[in-house]
Image (spheres, rainbow, N blue to C red):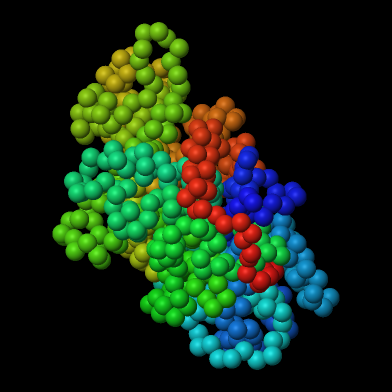
Amino acid sequence: MQPFLAIPEAGRVMFEGTSIPILGAGRLGASEGLAFPESAVGEREPTAAYLVLGDYLFTEDEGIAVNLEALIAMLAGDHPQTEMLAQLSFLDHLLGQPQIAAELTERYVDMWTDDVKERLRNALRPDASPRRAFLARQPILAAIRYVLTRESPPAPAARYPALVSAILLSHAVAMTLEASGEDTGELIAGSPAYLLLEVVRAAGLYSVLDMYAAIDRVVRLWELYGPRVTRGGLDKNPLELLTEATGLELKDIVGLGFVLLARRVNGLKGEPLFDSPDLRVGMDPKHVQSFLDLVSAEPEALSTALQSSDSRFAFLPIEQTPVLRTERGLLVLDEAALWKRITAGLYWAVHDYIKDVRAPKADDNLRWNEAYSEMVEMAVEDQLQAMAPRLLSSEGGTLFFTEEDMERAFGPQQRADAAVDFGEVMLLAEIVSGQLAVATRIEGSIAKFKDDTKRLVIEKCHQLDSASDAILAKERLLTGFPGPPGRRILPVVVVGGGYPVSRLTMAYIREELARLALLQDPRVMPLGIIDIEELEMMEGVADNHGLTPVEVLRAWRESPLGEWPLGYYLIQTYGSWGATQRATRMRGLVDQTIREIIDRLKLTPNNEPANVEGG
C-alpha cells in the first residue's frame, strides 16, 4: 500500500506523482494582512487594527465597567489548558487560510444577538477606518502565552464551546496589547518613538511565508554554499557542524518538519490538531527524538521560559520550540515559527551549540557568524547574477560585477558586494546576514533599534555611497565603457534576517542618510531594503512576468505600498504566490529534495491520525 504524507482529497492539488500538497505563499500574520494596535495604524495605510473585545462587547457607550484581568482569567480557564492551547493553535493556523478564516468569521458573527452582530459587522467592514483584522498573530500568541503561564486549576463547566472561548480570549488579550502606555514623549523622525517600536516589533510577526521557496533556500544555503565557505577558519564546514549540533542531517530536519506541517498546508478544516509522538514515520526513533529535542518542549518548560520576560512581544521561547508535547500528542502552536525553526533558525542551532556545548574559545561564535555571512552573500550574489541581463555580443564581457571586480577597478574603499547593469540604471547591492537584536524586537529598546539600524542598514549605505560615487565618476574602470547618458544608481540593502520596512522606519533612515550626507546625489535613486525571500520573489517576477529587478523595485517604491515590505506589494500586485510566480530554477532542486525526504522518512501505510477534531 502506498504510504502518504497527506490524505488525498478532491480539490487538493498535489505534487505530480506524490501525495504532497502544492505549497503556496501567503500568511502575513493576520486575517487582513498587516495588523497592529489601533494607535499604531495611520490613515490611508495598508494596515489593519486587530479586533478587540471592546469593539463589540462592553463598549464605552454601554457604560459597563469590566474587570479585564478577571475576564481574561475566566475565558482562559473555560476549558482545560491543553484544549485551550489546541483551539488557539487552530486560530493561528487560520492566519494562513483566508477562506476558512472568512467562514469562521461569519459563523462567529452570526452567533451573537442582533446588537452585537451589528457592531461586529460595522467593525469588520472593508471600508471601516481603521480596518479591523478578526484574527491576528500577536493577540493569538499573547493568548497562548497567557494560557501557558497562568495557574491551571480544574476547568469548570464550560460557558462557551472551546473555539469560541479561544476567539474571545484572543480578543480580550488584544485589549492589553495597546502600545500607548509606553509613550515617553520621545520622537524619532518626527513620530512618537513608542509607535515606531510597536511597528518594528509587530512587523516581525507579519512576514510572507513560502514553504516551497524555503526548501530551495535552506538546501542551497547549507548543501551548496556551506562546503564552499572560506571565512571563519572553523574546524568543520557548516553542514558538518549542523549535524554535530542536532544529531541529524539537514534533509532529516526538513523532512520531519514537513511531516508536522503537511496536513496543515491546505487547511485543517475538520482535521486533527494533534500529531502522534512518533510522527508515524519509519525513521530511526532516535532521529525522531533528536528532531523533537530541536523543536519541541513540555508545557512546564515552555511556561518557565515564557516567564523570563513580561514584554508584550515575549514570544521567543515559542519561536525556539513551537511544538508542544502534551498528553494528547504533539501540538504545533505556531506553524510559521516551526517552519522558520527548521530553515532560517538552523543558524541558531549551530550558534547555540557552539556557545553552550562545544566549550568554545571566545571568538568561536564570531567565526561562525563570518562563515554564515559568507554563505548568505554567495547565495544572494548568485541570485543577482541569475537576474542580470545577457550580453548578445560575441566579444564577451559581463553586466554583473562582484565586490572583487569593483575593488580592482576602484580600490578597497569604493566597492559594494554586487552590481548589475540594467542599461540606464545600475543596481548596486550590499548584503548583510544579520537580524534585529532581541532587545529591539522583544523588549522594544529605542537605543538598540538605532544600533540595529546602523549595523544592518546605515553602515551598508556608507559602502553603497562610496561605490555609487566611483561608478558615477569613473565607470569605465569597471565596465570598460563610459556610462550611458543619464546613468542612475539604484542602491539596495539585502538583509538576510529581515528589516522592518514601514513608513516610520523609512522616515528615520531617510533622516539619518541626510544627516550623514549618504546617497544624496540626485542620480542615486531611493534606497530599497529587502530580505532574501523578497529577492526570490523578484526572481520569480523576472521569470514569469519579464520584469527586471529595477522595474519591480521602482514600481514598488512609487506605489502606495512603497514604504511597506516589498513582499506585501508583490502579493497585492500579483496575487497568491504559487507555482506560476516562483523562480523556475527552484523546481528541480525542490522536487529532488521532496523525493529524498519521502525515502528518508520511510513512511508507514495506514497512518491513523489522533482522534481530535479542530475548528
Q: Nearer the viewer, residue 336 or 603?
A: 603
Which residue is depicted at the point 39% across and 69% down?
443
Give the x, y percent position of residue 79.
63, 84
417 displayed left or right of 522: left
Quadrant in the picture for the C terminus: bottom right
Vertical arrangement, residue 551 with respect to residue 19, above or below: above
Q: Nearer the viewer, residue 365 or 425?
A: 365
Which residue is depicted at the point 43% across and 49% down?
251
275 displayed left or right of 235: right
Give the x, y percent position of residue 106.
77, 65
Q: Residue furthest right?
A: 114
Vertical arrangement, residue 399 with respect to residue 229, above or below: above
Give the x, y percent position of residue 570.
58, 42
Which residue is depicted at the point 25% across and 51% down?
368
Q: Residue furthest top?
A: 394
Q: Residue furthest left?
A: 361
198 displayed left or right of 405: right
Give the x, y percent position of residue 130.
65, 61
Vertical arrangement, residue 70 with respect to residue 381, above or below: below
Q: Taking the image as drawn, is residue 59 in sight?
A: no
| Count of numbered badges drawn on the protein | 0
Q: Taking the image as drawn, is residue 569 in sight?
A: yes
Q: Nearer the viewer, residue 438 or 238?
A: 238
Which residue is depicted at the point 28% across and 38% down?
228
